Image (cartoon, rainbow, N blue to C red):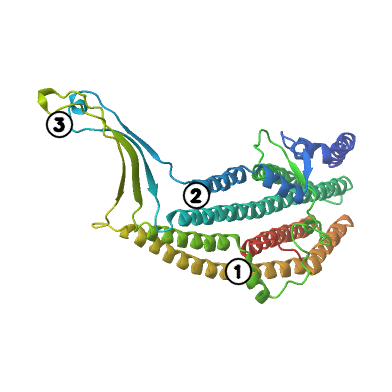
Amino acid sequence: MTKCPNQGWFKAIAICAFFLVSTNCPTKVVAQSSSVDTSPNLTPNRTVSLKASFDQAFNNNKEVIAAKYNVDISKAAIRIAGAVPNPRFNLQYGWGPAFEIIIAGNPQQVGFQNQLRTGGTRTKLINLARANFRTSELQVAALLFDIHNRVRRAYAELAAAEAYSDLIESERKVAIELLKTTVEHFLQGKGAQSDEFQARLGVLQFEIQRLQAQARLQVASSALSLITGEVPKSIEVIDVDDNGLFKLSADRTDLVPPPNKVLPPLEQLFPVAFSERPDLKVAIQQKFADRRALSVARAQRIPDLFIDTGYQFTTFKKQQPYGLFPGTVRNSPGCYINASFEVPIFYQHQGETTQAKEVLLQDYEQISQLEWQIATDVVTSYEAVAVARANITKYQRDLLPSAAKVSRLARRSYEEGKTDLATAILAKQQYQQILTSYFDAVVTYQTSWADLEKAMGVPLKL
């Protein structure tokens, strides 16, 4: 009575084994587990280097192109400030009794009016325009450094996204190999079918992570292309040629120096930061320009002089009516000169002078606050870099080798039938978590290094 069910059971196993072997179930089922295969979309469209990204951003970034016009505008302002006021032409010529009858006495006249600037206003305006021109140049330099820093961050994020995608693919392959082992154990009667289902579930979970990795790659590629001056027109994946830290090979990388390279002492960084920080240079130059503006405001208290010169003549009738003038009336020409200026009785431009003084005092406070902020940024970013480097070294020397060894031994023990599947899966998950944490540490290091460069105001090379 018990023989028949056993024969049916063995027959079912044989049929299942034939199906699995003939269709290569572990890989085919995994490939069909998702209706969308994401691997073709992860193929890079092109490869860019960090230096090429810098050059392209400096030449094509829209913010840089727009900001460079400010330099030309400020340069034109120098010419405007140095322009000598044009003379004003005056002409008075009339008809009718008012200009023909001598009793009216209205002459005809032609002349010029000229404005004479006093108090050195023209020279002070030129100095102010030159100071503003230098400010605009420093602002463009500050923007270029900001673009440099943002390109570094975008490139680092793309490198991290690429490395994360490679990690998912490699771990997925490990999960597929583990699934093959569970299928073999099941066919050999060494394991239960629930182990196969559990291993298959582990493979399926990577499909979601592959989609996330694809989205991260596409977003990072779009961010890098946008910061380098390109307008994304389609979904693409850009490949980077510098992700050595993610591959545990830090011999050469342009993104960040190797973690084992010694950092300079913190005390040596402060003088460099205070002399190279672009926004501090802009603030100091702006203070200089505002001092020039105060000089212009004070010069405006002396009123400009307006000089009128000209020639006048008469067009009276030779014979005046009503016997106003006996005989013949002759033309009475002559030259004239008039001088006029504003009399500062009610207002002496106190408002402009006071405003310029307050702006200058505000500049001093802003520079002091910026110097305090620079010192804080240098200290915090330096400490963050040191901690991140220490974490990476710890991962590379201790955690990653140990986790890889534990995962490898657990898998081998499962293949030999010494341990169960749960132990192998747990060891694999721990290794993946440590790898993910290591990647996070590398990203933190790259971000901290970008923060340190921003705090210093100059690209750092060790």
Q: CA distance from mark 2 to mark 3?
A: 48 Å
- Are the residues at dot 2 and dot 3 in contact (C-beta closer than 8 Å)? no
x then y, percent, for residue 382: 65, 69
Mark 1 or mark 2, which is nearer the start of the sequence?
Answer: 2
Mark 3 or mark 2, which is nearer the start of the sequence?
Answer: 2
Quadrant showing the N terminus: top right
Mark 3 highlights which residue? 103
x then y, percent, for residue 424: 80, 57
State the residue in front, 283 or 225. 283
Visible residue check, residue 87:
yes
Indicate which disc residue 97 carries. Answer: none
Residue at (74% x, 38% y) in the render: 38
Q: CA distance from mark 2 to mark 1?
A: 34 Å
How packed mark 2 is, by other alpha carbons closer than 10 Å (few <14, some 14-19, many 20 or more), is some
State the residue in front, 176 or 335. 335
Mark 1 highlights which residue? 274
Q: Secondary structure at mark 3?
A: loop
Mark 3 or mark 1, which is nearer the start of the sequence?
Answer: 3
- Residue type of the residue flagged with mark 3: Ile
